[in-house]
Amino acid sequence: MAFVSSGYNPDKPMEDRISDIGPRFYKEFLPPVLEKNYGKWVSHEILEPGLLVHEAESGDKVYTVRVGSARLISTELIREACAVAKQYCDGYLRWTTRNNIEFMTTSLESAKALKADLNSRKFDKGSYKFPVGGTGASVSNIVHTQGWIHCHTPATDASGTVKIIMDELFEEFTNMRMPAIVRVAVACCLNMCGACHCSDLAVVGFHRKPPIIDHEYLDNMCEIPLAIASCPTGALKPGKTELEGGKKVNTILVNNDRCMYCGNCYTMCPSLPLSDKEGDGVIIMVGGKVSNRISMPKFSKVAVAFIPNEPPRWPTLAKVCKKIIEVYAAEANKYERLGDWAERIGWESFFKKTELEFTHHLIDDFRDPAYFTWRQSTNFKF
Ligand code: HEM
Ligand code: SF4
Ligand code: SF4
């Protein structure tokens, strides 16, 4: 397409420049019933999966229909959501902290019609565009990251793995038959953008080979001390090497025995790439939570040390995720989050019941705090 100017003048970049205006004030976008009853809500109820009602002091009610979204969506799909909002909700809608979409109406009839309409919309290939669900003790949307769509440090894909896990657990999105909420998260590298470290079930992209060193360019591309300081295990040191042709260059040397393939040094230095088709895959972590309900918040713990990347449908990953959630659903008490359950029955029982293999990779060996993850008690089950 030919260039079309927005009015910005590249010869005078600071002229007519608007800055530091911040986001729009959220109350500009509140449906009137929310604006009127703001801060005066007395009760709420989940009427059915994906449908909530909130009642205010005034007696006003607002019905909310929650639908799944792929998070990564086109303007076309956003426009379709806007058209639905225009038809049923006076043009108002909102996104949740797990990237679901919520449509609000003031009558039960229109909420039911809205729900039926949303559930009837499909893409050409058959997937639901706006599947209703994600409320109560269900598996709601998966908080996830960029993957091979946009990031340069991933060890796996995000949108792809999320689609297969949600396909596998779709019945749990549209029902509320879990002992408690199951939060699933995906991060495509150990930077863990998002919620993997505090989710009931988490999938994290993982490397298994040390970085390759591009000696020729390293000193030109990288601030060497920054890369060295980025290593959590002290596997890197400054050094010199001779290139083919005899030229001596400053570079970085990697002690492969100390490297645990975190990829931090590559984040700091483009000359230390480490992604690898066979080496890369995912780990599964379980048992994290952020709420303070009954038990304190918990970190998730590594339960599966490695599953290979199997695009496009990651069958092994899908199977293992489903198995863990099925066993939890069958065994846990009401209100028990996955971590509450695993801690009550003991991790040795968790591994036995889920039939996951316990390998030496799962035993913490990172600095002094590793000691506190070992068992200093004779309390265990055979
Ligand atoms: C029938 C004989 C015994 C009974 C019923 C008995 C019972 C107990 C009990 C209930 C405890 C407390 C455990 C805990 O705090 O969880 C204990 C601790 C202890 N017992 Fe015995 N005990 C017996 C014989 C002995 C003998 C013969 C010795 C030494 C020669 C001994 C040395 C100790 C020691 C050192 C502790 C402290 C262990 C620790 O806190 O790590 N006990 N015993
Ligand atoms: S988790 Fe890692 S790979 Fe994924 S978006 Fe974040 S930094 Fe990039
Ligand atoms: S990948 Fe991680 S552990 Fe390995 S050298 Fe780089 S920073 Fe250190």
Image (cartoon, rainbow, N blue to C red):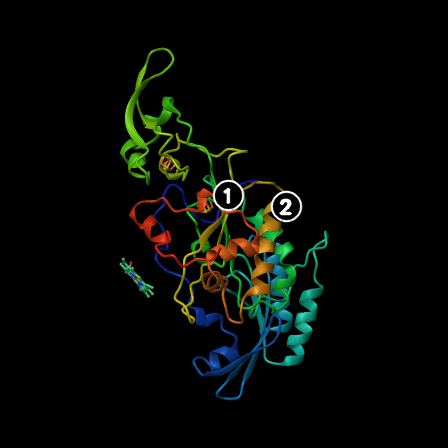
- Callouts 1 and 2 close, C-beta under 8 Å: no
The numbered mark at residue 98 is none
Residue 228 higher or lower than 247, as above or below:
below
Q: Nearer the viewer, mark 1 or mark 2?
A: 2
Where residue 9 appears, x then y in whole percent? 41, 45
Could you tell me the amino acid type at mark 1? His
Q: Residue at x 40, y 42 (%)?
A: 10
State the quadrant of the N terminus.
top right
User: Farthest bottom residue?
Assistant: 58
Residue 126 higher or lower than 47, as above or below:
above
Q: Residue at x 61, y 63 (%)?
A: 173
Residue 107 placement: quadrant: bottom right
**Within-10-Å neighbours for mark 2: few <14, some 14–19, many 20+:** some
- Asked whether, in this view, residue 18 is left or right of residue 144, the answer is left
Where residue 14 appears, x then y in whole percent? 34, 48
- Asked whether, in this view, residue 275 is left or right of residue 269, the answer is right
Mark 1 within 8 Å of ligand 2, using the beta carbon:
yes
Q: Which residue is mark 2?
A: 315
The quarter of the picture showing ligand 3 = top left
Residue 172 higher or lower than 360, as above or below:
below
First in residue order: circle 1 vs circle 2: 1
Residue 27 placement: quadrant: bottom left
The numbered mark at residue 150 is 1
- Asked whether, in this view, residue 183 is left or right of residue 108, the answer is left
Q: Residue at x 53, y 47 (%)?
A: 357
Could you tell me the amino acid type at mark 2? Pro
